[in-house]
Image (cartoon, helix red, strand yellow):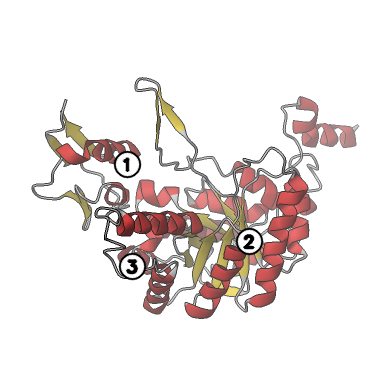
Amino acid sequence: MAINKVWIDEGCTACGLCEDICPEVFKLKEEATIIENADYANFEQKIKEAAESCPVEVIKYSE
Amino acid sequence: MKNLNVKYMGIELDNPIIVGACNLSANLDSLKKAEELGAGAIVYKSLFEEQIQLERFQLDERLNEFNDLYAEMVTIHPNIKHAGPDEHLLNLRKARESLSIPLIASLNAINSDTWIKYALLISSETGVDGIELNFYQTPSDFNKNAKEIENEQINIVKEIKQNTSIPVSLKLSSDYTNILNFIRKLDNTGVNAFVLFNSFFQPDIDIISEKHVKSFNLSNEGNYKKSLRYAGLLYENIKADICSSQGIFTGADVIKLILSGASCVQVVSTLYKNGLPQINNIKKELSEWMDLKNYKNIDEFRGKLSKNKCSSNPFIYKRAQYVDLLINSEELFEDKNKT
């Protein structure tokens, strides 16, 4: 299954870990954000890694 | 707020809460925010020799990948070389210039020569207030004994101490045969502080895909207890300062470590899980507790429950097993005194 949506729930601590892992999809502003028109298909593994590594588990995705 | 001043590695800190080396501490915005929220000092993200070696290898690969495309070609790029640690040194210098609180560099090298070379570069070119040597080598050589590993590390520290003018601290793993003996030998080199202990990447496996997975190892609440034990054992037994690290999440954790003998603490995981405002929460909790206990400054209670000052319970820092007789020795001694 391919990732078709990525989003961030409330509670981001702005640690920037997701951007460190997958800068192609995540961008840290006041909180973590998803880059507009990001290419999920090419970075699936990194998105999953970012979601698993998120200390507060707010990164979600659907397949 | 109470007077939370402490002296660490000879550097005056406004308070004992130090942001430990991590990805957060490599970002200028985060550094400024940590300063605004009251961090006592910051340890900048480590310079890793392995990272530089990898980048150098990748650059060489890219520069040379098309060299043999046509028989008459020798090379298609000019003679470009990787800049080594220069980018890191530049970022460190920028960070130092942007902050008013003490900034400590962190170094993690592999080869003895590189340890010394990079430490000297950091010391002479960045203006940082101190340098933290991040010692950890996963044993991979079956023929190398503990003494050889320890002597190598002691010699690196001696060389760096002799050739740098800034304070030097050592961040150690607890995985030495006798960490107390090793620390005493290192203490004799004149090193300024020990950071106890380091957290490391550990491999993990996904059993469905049967592949290794990368995992970001954050500490959990309560993981500070080994650091507490060794702060208690080392306090007033070495000349260097003790900075506790690993699993320190709350003001209560900080109080416990200072009572054991730590001069200050490093926090990382709690900032990832609770955000940078946790620095201020920890300071507030510490200050309120000092109010409650009528302590005017940190020196009044630092080391109060260290091994040297804890004569009522001599076994507490030694026990590793659950033996009722020893764990409850305080009560037993009290009962004996009554009879």
Q: Residue at x 72, y 48 (%)?
A: B179
Residue B258 pos. (x, y %): 62, 56
Instruction: Determine the secondary structure under disc 2.
Output: helix
Are discs 3 and 2 both within one chain? yes
Residue type beneath disc 1: Cys
Residue type beneath disc 2: Ser
Residue B122 pos. (x, y %): 51, 73
Residue to which mark 1 is pinned: A54
Say which of A46 and B21 sits in front. A46
- Is label 1 in contact with label 3 (beta carbons under 8 Å)? no
Residue A53 pos. (x, y %): 34, 40
- Is label 2 in contact with label 1 (beta carbons under 8 Å)? no
Instruction: Determine the secondary structure under disc 3.
Output: helix
Q: Is residue B247 left or right of residue A9?
A: right
Say which of B328 and A59 sits in front. A59
Disc 1 from disc 3: Cα separation: 21 Å
Residue to which mark 3 is pinned: B28
Q: Residues within 10 Å of mark 2 (few under 14, many from 20)?
A: some
Residue B123 pos. (x, y %): 55, 75
Displayed quadrant of residue B37: bottom left
Say which of B66 and B2 sits in front. B66
